[in-house]
């Protein structure tokens, strides 16, 4: 069986499968190289992320997808039961060893690595503070200390290999989503990944964690880089990624056009 789990909410959710060992076959639709079997390992799924889980149905009984409301205990509802059966009466506690994409799977050749030559490099810090967003006073969520539309633009040329350093300096989780492109995860907290190459369009950044990501600028247009916690996006955590293209549309206070 192959089961795709998509987080369509704004907050992180922790899930696992009960009833059969499973593999994480893909993240954001991109296959993992040589995934290993896992048993009741918690999977932290950030907003907009997708996990493809692969498992073999047991000869008897059901397989259950469980969720945790507090990162400590699983709950009977909501749950998804695959096969004949019901949610077990006694549910396990959430394992303290969560899924770690940094070490999962096996290394494989990849076109983008830490040793690649990058044509452009950007550093983006993520944070929050009390302030003003579009004339509203409240908690604002910032990229490099600024809120949209004052966050500036990342200007690209087609064919460039682009590297970004994403540094979450806040106490909050930020699922950062890049529209129109697929990026390779290079490092986590300064350390290169040692498992399978990881290709994503959304990266779930825990508090006070950082990642280096890189992508090929191969899709000319005007795109967004933003937090997929839509409260954070609505209160400032957006940035435009733009190629040398023309558009009749304008963003900002004069036009009244605010993408998020």
Image (spheres, rainbow, N blue to C red):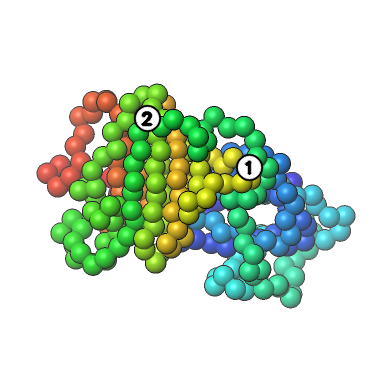
- Asked if labels 1 and 2 touch by Cβ distance under 8 angstroms, the answer is no
- Within 10 Å of disc 2 (Cα), the crowding (few <14, some 14-19, many 20+) is few
Say whether residue 146 is left or right of residue 2.
left
Question: Residue visible at 23% across and 67% down?
Answer: 130
Is 107 in front, or is 20?
107
Q: Relative to residue 216, is residue 179 depicted above or below?
A: below
Quarter of the view holding residue 152: top left
Coordinates of residue 231 in the picture (x, y in percent): 34, 59
Q: Which of the two discs, 2 and 1, labels the residue nearer the N terminus?
A: 2
Task: Return the residue at label 1.
Answer: 196
Is 171 in front, or is 133?
171
Q: Residue furthest right?
A: 59
Question: Residue visible at 42% across and 26% down?
Answer: 218
Say whether residue 38 is left or right of residue 185.
right
Q: Residue furthest bottom?
A: 90
Q: Residue furthest left?
A: 254
Helix, strand, or loop for circle 1?
Answer: loop
Question: Residue visible at 24% across and 47% down?
Answer: 151
Task: Return the residue at label 2.
Answer: 119
- Within 10 Å of disc 1 (Cα), the crowding (few <14, some 14-19, many 20+) is many
Coordinates of residue 213 in the picture (x, y in percent): 45, 42
Quarter of the view holding residue 245: top left
Coordinates of residue 198 in the picture (x, y in percent): 56, 42
Question: Residue visible at 72% across and 56% down?
Answer: 38
Task: Mark 2 vs mark 1: give the one in front.
Answer: 2
Coordinates of residue 193 in the picture (x, y in percent): 57, 46
Q: Is residue 51 visible?
A: no
Helix, strand, or loop for circle 2?
Answer: loop
Is 201 in front, or is 154?
154
């Amino acid at each position: 069986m192959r089961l795709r789990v998509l987080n369509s909410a704004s907050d992180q959710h922790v899930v696992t499968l009960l009833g059969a060992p499973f593999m994480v076959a893909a993240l954001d639709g991109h296959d993992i190289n040589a995934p290993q079997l896992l048993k009741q390992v918690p999977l932290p799924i950030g907003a907009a992320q997708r996990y493809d889980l692969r498992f073999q149905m047991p000869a008897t009984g059901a397989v259950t997808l469980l969720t945790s409301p507090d990162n400590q205990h699983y709950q009977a509802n909501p749950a998804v039961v695959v096969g004949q059966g019901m949610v077990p009466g006694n549910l396990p506690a959430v394992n303290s060893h969560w899924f770690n994409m940094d070490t999962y799977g096996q290394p494989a050749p990849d076109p983008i690595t830490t040793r690649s030559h990058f044509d452009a490099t950007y550093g983006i810090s993520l944070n929050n503070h009390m302030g003003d967003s579009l004339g509203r006073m409240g908690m604002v969520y910032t990229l490099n200390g600024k809120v949209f539309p004052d966050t500036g633009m990342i200007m690209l040329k087609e064919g460039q290999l682009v590297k970004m350093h994403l540094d979450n300096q806040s106490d909050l989780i930020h699922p950062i989503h890049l529209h129109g492109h697929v990026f390779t995860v290079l490092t986590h907290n300064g350390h290169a990944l040692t498992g399978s190459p990881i290709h994503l369009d959304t990266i779930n950044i825990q508090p006070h964690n950082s990642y280096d990501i890189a992508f090929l600028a191969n899709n000319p247009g005007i795109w967004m880089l933003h937090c997929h916690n839509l409260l954070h996006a609505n209160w400032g955590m957006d940035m435009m990624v733009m190629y040398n293209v023309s558009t009749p549309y304008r963003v900002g206070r004069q036009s009244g056009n605010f993408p998020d």
